[in-house]
Amino acid sequence: MKENLSIPVDGETALATPIGEDLALITGVADVMPATVEVLLNGDPSMIMKAGVVSWSRDGAPSEAATGFVALVPIKLASKVRLRSIVMRRGGHPIRYTLVKPAVSVTDLVQVIANDASDRMAEVADRVAQALMVGKNHPKRLAAALSVLTTAAKTDGWIEVMGPLDTGEIFLQGWAADLPSNQVRVLVAQGGLMTGEFKVASIARNDLGGNGTGFVGLLDTGKITVETEKLQKLFFRSTQGWRILEVYDRRVLLEPTDVPAHIRDGLVRATANPETLRTLRRAGERFDGRDTVSNLKQPVRIGMDMVVEVPGGGLLVAGWMLDPEGHAESVVLRAGAETARVDDSWTRLPRPDVATAFQQNDLFAGRLDPHRIDHGFLAFVPGLSCTGNVPVYFEFTVGDSVAYYPLTPMRNLSRRAFERLVAPLDPRTAAAGVAIERHIGPMMQALAAPAPEVVEARDFSFDEAGTTKALVVGAVHDAEEAASALVLLALDAETRNVPVILSTSIEAFGSIAPEAERLAHFYGLKLRVIGSEGVQDACDAFEAAVQASTADALVFLSADVLPRQSGWLSSLERAYRKRGGKALVSPTLVYEDESIRFAGTWFDAEEQKLVDRYIGYPRDVVQGSDPREVMAGSTACCIVSRAAVQAAGGFTRSYLGTSDKGRDLCLKLRLAGTPSVWLPNVEMISAEDSGGGSSPAMRRLAQRIDRWSFDRKWSLLVNNMR
C-alpha cells in the first residue's frame, strides 16, 4: 500500500479505482449518501449515469464527513477522454468531487476502506463484492470482487479432501477455526466468484492442538457447476468478519462413487443440527458403485441386456425388470449429474424367459401373473452422455428408500447387436410403432456413427491414371457373390479394362481378397481390394471407396446387381456426360422373373409423398420410355460424380437398410444441384434383398424404422423439391 494513502475527508476530492474500461469505484466522504445516485461524468449534463453506492458510518467524524462511501460508477467516455471529476446528485444539493491522481489499485482501495470502516469492513466488503458481481459477468469485475474479499478476509482453515456427488453437490472435508456448523452462505472462488450454500457438520480432531475443529459438508452452487480441480477457496462470514477456507496443495480429489463412503465415515463423529445431519446421511446413501437393487427385501429385480452410448448423443438401455407388486415408484437413469426418468416412457417387450426363470424363486413365488410376460424394456434417452467416465446407473425409489443398479455402457452398437435387441418387436403391431416413435427412431436420428475407414488395401495391377471413371463393387460379407461380380465384369469387353475397386468390410477382407487376387491375375483386371471398419452394407462399402479413388466419376455397383445386357456402362456414362457430370444416373432394376424392382422414385402429388413406381409390373411396361429426371435414383447401380458425393457428405449412417439410405443421398445431391436421372431401357438384374441374413420380420421392422427416420427428415422438404 502506498504510504500515507487514506480516504479524502475534505468532501471535495475522491479516490478513483478503474475496473476494466466501463466501471470505476469512487471512494470519498459526505454528510449522507443514498444507495443510488445520479452521477455526471466530468460535470457534463449529457453524461448522466446511475451509480450504486455502498456506505458506512464514520465514528467521531464531523457531520459533513459522517459517511464514507464507495460508488460503482458506469463509464461511457470516448477512448481519449479521461475521467477527471464527477458530480453526484442527491436529494439535497449536488456534490462535486475532483478525482485524486494517480488511480488507486483495488488492493490499496480495500486497505483504505478497512482502515476507515473498521469493524464494519466485513459488511462493506460483502456489499462491494456483491455489487461487482451483479450485472455483466466481466472478468475484471469478478477479479476485483475476489481481490476485495481476499484483502479483507483472513485464512481460517484448509480444505483437504473434496469430490463431487452424483447429485451435483461438492463434498468438502478439512478443518477450520471459526467456521459455523449447519448452513453457511459462502462465496466460491473458481476463476471468478459464485455464491453457494455450505451445509457443514463439525468433527473433533486431536491433531489441531485445540486451534480448530474438523468439518465435513456439502457445497451447493445451484445450476453452476464447480470443478473440484479448479476450486481455489471459499469465503464465509464469521462473527469476526470475512474468513477464507484455502484449498490444500496436496488435497485429495475423490471420484463420485468414493464420496458416499467418506461421508459415512465422517458422520460417525459429526455434530450438527438434525436437518444438516439428515442431509449428510442421505448424501452418504448415494450411489457408490454397488448393486443394491439385488439386496432389496421387496420383490423387485432388474437385469440388463445392453447399455449403449449412441454416437451423436444419448443412451440406449434395454433389459428386463420384475416388479409384480409395483413397489418401484420410479426408475431414473443417471449419468453423472444428468438424469432422466425412464419407467414412465420406456417400451415394454415380451420376455417369457424372465418369468420362467423366476417362477421358483422364493421372493417371487406366487406373485407372478402367468398371463403377463412384458417384463422386458427398451428406452432411448437423448442428451445423456457418459463422457469423462462418469458413473452411469439406475436409481430406484422404493418406498422411503433408494436403491441403485450400476450400468456399463458400450461405445458402439453393431447391426447384429441391434437386431437382437429389437427382435421381440412384431413389426405388424401398434407396439412396434410406439417403440419406433419414442425410442428407436429418435436413436437412429441421433446416431452419428463415424464414416467407414479404410484399414487395409491391396492393389493388383490397379491404375487410375488416364481414366475418368472407376467401378466400385460393394460386397459386404459374401465372398462368392463378390467373385461372381468380378467374373462378369471381366467377361464384358466394355468393363474389362475399367479400374475396379472391390470394397468390403474388414471382417470379410481376409476371405474375399485372396480369391479377388486370383481372379485379377487370371482375367487381367485392374483391381484394388479395400477392407474398412464400419461397413455393414453396400452403401457403407461405396462410402469407403470414395476415399480410395481419385477418379472423377464413380460407378456404384452392388455385388448382388448383375448386368442383363451388354453396353450398360456406356449407356449410363453417355447420359452422365450429356448432363456435364451433374447427375446421378441409374438404370431399371428387375427381378429374376423380369418384374420391375426399381424404376425411379417419384413424387406422388395426391399422397404428398415419395413413391417407387412400377414395382412388380412386367418390365415391358417401361420399355421404350425416354430417360426421365426423378426424385431419386438407385445407388445399387449408378454413375455419379465423386466430388458431388463428397460435397453432399456421403451416405447418412442413421439407416438400417440401403433403400432409404440411398434415397437420402440422392435427395442431398438434388439439393446441391445434382439431380437423379432414370434410364428405362438400361436394365440390371437384382435379386430380392436378403437383408444381410436377417429374418423377414427383422427386414420389415428395419424398413419401418428407416421409413420413420426418412419421413421425419424429408417429408417437409420434398414438397419444395418436386
Image (spheres, rainbow, N blue to C red):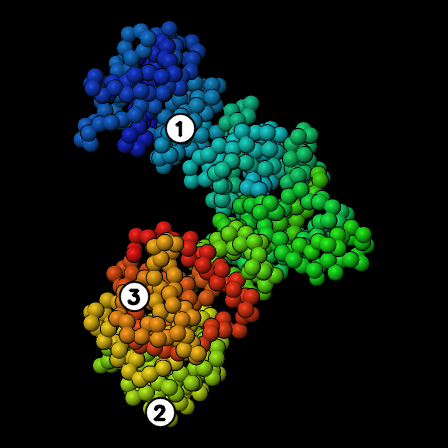
SS at mark 2 in the image:
helix
Give the CA separation, mark 2 to mark 1.
79 Å
Quadrant holding the C terminus = bottom left
Q: Give the residue pinned by disc 1.
A: 134
SS at mark 1 in the image:
loop
Residue 552 in percent (x, y) is at: 25, 73
Question: Local crowd at mark 1 within 10 Å, few (<14), some, or many (≥20)?
Answer: few
Q: Residue at x 26, y 71 (%)?
A: 626
Q: Is residue 41 visible?
A: yes
Task: Of the two numbered discs 2 and 1 on the same chain, state the one appearing first in sequence.
Answer: 1
Q: Give the residue pinned by disc 2.
A: 523
Residue in front for this viewpoint, 424 or 469: 424
Task: Of the two numbered discs 1 and 3 on the same chain, state the one appearing first in sequence.
Answer: 1
Would residue 306 appear left or right of 618 to someone viewing this image?
Answer: right
Front disc: 2 or 1: 2
Report which quarter residue 575 is drawn in.
Answer: bottom left
Which of the labelled discs sits on residue 676, or is there none?
3
Task: Of the two numbered discs 2 and 3 on the same chain, state the one appearing first in sequence.
Answer: 2
| Image marks 1 and 3: residues in contact by CB distance under 8 Å | no
Front disc: 2 or 3: 3
Residue 121 in percent (x, y) is at: 45, 21
